[in-house]
Amino acid sequence: MAKKNGRVSSKAVSAFGLSLALLVATTTLAGASTLSSVGIYSQNSNQQADCWATTWGKAGPSPQCRNWSQSLQTGLPSDTSLQQDFCMNYGQGAREMNQPSTADLSGVFGFRTTSSNYQRIDPVTGSGCGITGTSSRWGMALHGTSSNGFCVPVNCGIMHLLNWTTMAVRPFQGAHSLAYGARFGVVSDNVGWPVAQSIWHGFICPALHDTRTGQGFLLCQETWRSDPGADAFCHQSYSTLDGSGICLDGPKVTAIMASGGNGGFREFIGPDPGGDYGIVWTRPEAGSKLATSTAGSFKNLNQFGAQRYEMTVSPDQLRRIVGMFNLALSIDQERGQYLNVAPMSTRLGDWALTSLQVGAEGNSLNQSPSAMIGVTSSNLMAKSF
């Protein structure tokens, strides 16, 4: 992920230690309240409905619900404010799968769609996506080449995506923790053997937004991978006194890895200074530091079968994550980069939950002209407690 060139000065490393000390000592909360456990979002399989909080305050959230029978969405700009099931063929040159289709793709996905409302294709490449409409089961088939809009080798993805249209949901207010999870598993794919046709990984990610600076990041649990790889890993250029690893590409920080690690995997943050596309990768494994897994365990080597995953992020874990992002920025700024970007807020009440998503992404391998996956996911939830 990053080349080994450049060094981090002792000044920056000292700043990291000071930053962590300040973050741990910070207890000032914006808009603190005495919230008990509050449901932010849930899927009810029996009622085939999703419900989510739309307001946040001392009186508790106001719920809003929708039925699963609504049509599949395709990630177009007009859809991005909705709470829907999405198929998104994203990446450089990717085509939009936005045309209804009655073709029977059940043999590809591993399940049958019940209506053309739940299936979309790109008529140029034949790439398509479908859902059952009742059980949050999704499938994607991609065909073609990079020249006709099939995203090879960059990622394509399929997900259930919830977007809040306001910054009202503040799960860390009152020194509360955030919990989120889903039932997730793989139905089918064309990873292939002995020569792989595709590679995929699954994820559950809330998006957190710093309302003071306008920055944000996805806090992603990688639940499953079709290969044995340690994707959340970069070539360490320097380490801090607490064992965190710093990865550089020229003068810029590309990642900071948490200390420790399991089987070569290192939890890490990928900075996006001044933006909202920073990312945190962690896994439901013992010893994780950036989130705590309370249900399910990481699967790889293409192990099929659904599990219930659930994880929590405590105030101290959020402070640690913010400290890592701010360390990356301080190193960049010492090297003349991003001088106009402010550090992320250390006040827990400044952080809003703006999105929640569960899904899978991947691409073809070994010059294969196609990639396919079918997944099942249900009972997505988030709460503050």
Image (cartoon, grey):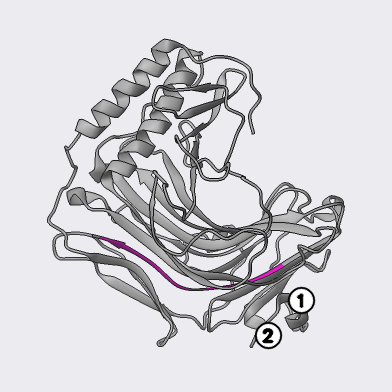
Query: Residue 267: x, y in percent?
Result: 49, 42
Q: Which mark is residue 112?
A: 2
Cα distance between the residues tagged 2 and 1? 9 Å
Residue 199 against residue 87 in the figure, above or below: above
Q: Looking at this view, is 336 or 117 the one in front?
A: 336
Question: Which residues are the magenta region?
Answer: 373-384
Q: Which residue is identified by label 1?
A: 108
Q: Looking at this view, is 247 or 91 the one in front?
A: 247
Q: Where the N terminus falls, by quadrant?
A: top right
Magenta: main secondary structure equals strand
Q: Looking at this view, is 294 or 137 the one in front?
A: 294
Residue 357 against residue 255 in the figure, above or below: below
Q: Where the C terminus falls, by quadrant?
A: bottom left
Q: Looking at this view, is 148 or 152 the one in front?
A: 152
Query: Residue 111: x, y in percent?
Result: 67, 82
Residue 69 belongs to magenta span: no
Label 2 CA crowd tier, 10 Å (few <14, some 14–19, many 20+)? some
Write the residue at 50% across / 70% down.
Answer: 307
